[in-house]
């Protein structure tokens, strides 16, 4: 116990690595309305991607795909952080509804950034997106694995691709 | 109030107001959107120079050595140090700056990076017309000559401005845009599998409004190759201002 406490302390005082995504200072709102940061799951490996709640097709597929990765990885520490590309529409109520509809448990965190910050995260993760006249958002579905300190260590570009890079990086 | 306004105006680099209009995008967002409305906006008349960026770094020391996630290791690599231009021309455009650093500079001035649509709209002006640079042989020739150049860019304002009063929109450097990562996803790419099409130059050009417009294609392809922390020796920026 004492050792664990010391490790916990080390996490909180060590400066973040230069290439940690957690260097980005974003204001995120979770489904329960609480404020949080990208580093919410710091100390554990995290799968991170972006979505929008009204997405008819690609986002449910993305959620299903991440579920498969979780099943294959069998890593109890692994967490999922999904950040909205449409923060003005994806209110806490909508995020809650989405979590319930997909049966997402505590290992998943759906958040909306402060409007405007979605572009910062997307640009950093290499996610391309454009809002269509219909209001739908065309976006690439890049799934990035962060190490416990937030460093991107593997990514899968697009749905239906091999998860091997992520699974190997987790080993 | 007037005095404050005058001081603010004097301390800003020159920018001009670009009248609104309609822009014919190289990659229409959808078949129904061949013309995009553009609201009036302000834009720096030149790219941000080395001297201007040095002044910013002295005011905002946190951008002298940002973490790699915000600017890769080559950030300002041609400078003697983040507080010393060394042998660089202070009047040349700053390059080797990341998207994050460029945005921080523009936000510090009360603006932001121009959107792709704003930039392309402003850049389509010739010396005498608000549109037409993309079909103008002289502009295309300038751009093609520039592709062949090597070495660091020379000083800004060495050529005539376009109709809006903007210098160096073509032929000096590439420039960051706010939504550089919005490119090459056409309306036909709604199916996830179709997005792969945009990774191929030929397939991408098929959806372009004018496949002959080689210079525009190069700009869009270049932007889509970037990541937010990338820096290169011929990529700089200028700021835009919305009311």
Image (cartoon, rainbow, N blue to C red):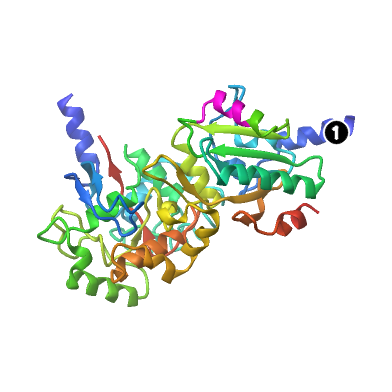
Answer with left or right where residue B48 lies relative to residue A40: left
Establish if A101 lies above or below B181: above
Magenta-drawn stretch contains B126: no
The region drawn magenta spans: A90-98
**Closer to the camera, A9 or A168?**
A168
**Closer to the camera, A53 or B12?**
A53
Answer with left or right where residue B9 lies relative to residue B175: left
Q: Position of residue A163 (x, y in %)?
A: 71, 56
Q: Quadrant of residue A53?
A: top right
Q: Position of residue B75 (x, y in %)?
A: 48, 57
Pointer 1 residue: A4
Establish if B48 lies above or below B216: above
Answer with left or right where residue A120 lies relative to residue A30: left
**Closer to the camera, B2 or B39?**
B39
Q: Quadrant of residue A38?
A: top right
Residue at 20% over, 40% down:
B10
**Prevalent SS, magenta region:** helix
Residue at 37% over, 39% down:
B107
Residue at 15% over, 27% down:
B2
Residue at 38% over, 61% down:
B220
Q: Secondary structure at mark 1?
A: helix
Q: Position of residue A29 (x, y in %)?
A: 56, 27
């Amino acid at each position: 116990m004492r050792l664990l406490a010391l490790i916990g302390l080390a996490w909180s005082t060590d400066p973040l690595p230069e290439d940690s995504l957690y260097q980005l200072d974003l204001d995120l709102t979770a489904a329960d309305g609480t404020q949080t940061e990208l580093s919410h799951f710091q100390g554990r490996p995290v799968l991170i991607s972006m979505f929008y709640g009204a997405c008819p097709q690609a986002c449910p597929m993305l959620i299903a795909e991440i579920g498969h990765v979780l099943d294959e990885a069998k890593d109890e520490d692994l967490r999922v952080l999904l950040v909205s590309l449409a923060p003005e529409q994806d209110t806490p109520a909508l995020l809650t509804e989405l979590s319930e509809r997909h049966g997402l448990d505590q290992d998943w965190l759906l958040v909306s950034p402060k409007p405007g910050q979605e572009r910062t995260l997307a640009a950093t993760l290499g996610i391309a997106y454009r809002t269509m006249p219909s209001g739908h958002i065309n976006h690439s579905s890049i799934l990035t694995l962060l190490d416990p300190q937030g460093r991107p260590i593997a990514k899968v570009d697009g749905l239906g691709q091999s998860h091997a890079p992520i699974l190997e990086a987790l080993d | 109030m007037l005095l404050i306004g005058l001081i603010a105006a004097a301390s800003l680099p020159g920018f001009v107001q670009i009248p609104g209009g309609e822009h014919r995008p190289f990659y229409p967002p959808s078949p129904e959107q061949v013309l995009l409305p553009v609201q009036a906006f302000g834009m720096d008349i030149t790219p941000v120079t080395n001297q201007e960026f040095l002044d910013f770094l002295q005011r905002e020391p946190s951008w002298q050595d940002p973490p790699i996630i915000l600017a890769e290791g080559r950030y300002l690599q041609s400078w003697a140090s983040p507080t010393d231009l060394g042998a660089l021309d202070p009047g040349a455009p700053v390059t080797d700056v990341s998207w994050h650093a460029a945005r921080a500079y523009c936000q510090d001035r009360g603006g932001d990076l121009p959107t792709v649509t704003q930039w392309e709209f402003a850049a389509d002006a010739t010396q005498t017309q608000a549109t037409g640079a993309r079909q103008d042989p002289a502009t295309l020739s300038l751009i093609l000559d520039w592709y062949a150049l090597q070495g660091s860019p020379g000083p800004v304002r060495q050529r005539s401005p376009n109709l809006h009063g903007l210098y160096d929109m073509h032929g000096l450097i590439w420039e960051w845009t706010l939504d550089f990562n919005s490119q090459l996803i056409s309306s036909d790419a709604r199916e996830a599998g179709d997005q792969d099409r945009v990774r191929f130059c030929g397939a991408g050009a098929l959806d372009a409004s004018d496949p002959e417009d080689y210079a525009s294609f190069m700009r869009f392809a270049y932007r889509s190759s970037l990541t937010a922390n990338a820096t290169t020796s011929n990529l700089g920026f200028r700021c835009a201002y919305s009311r």
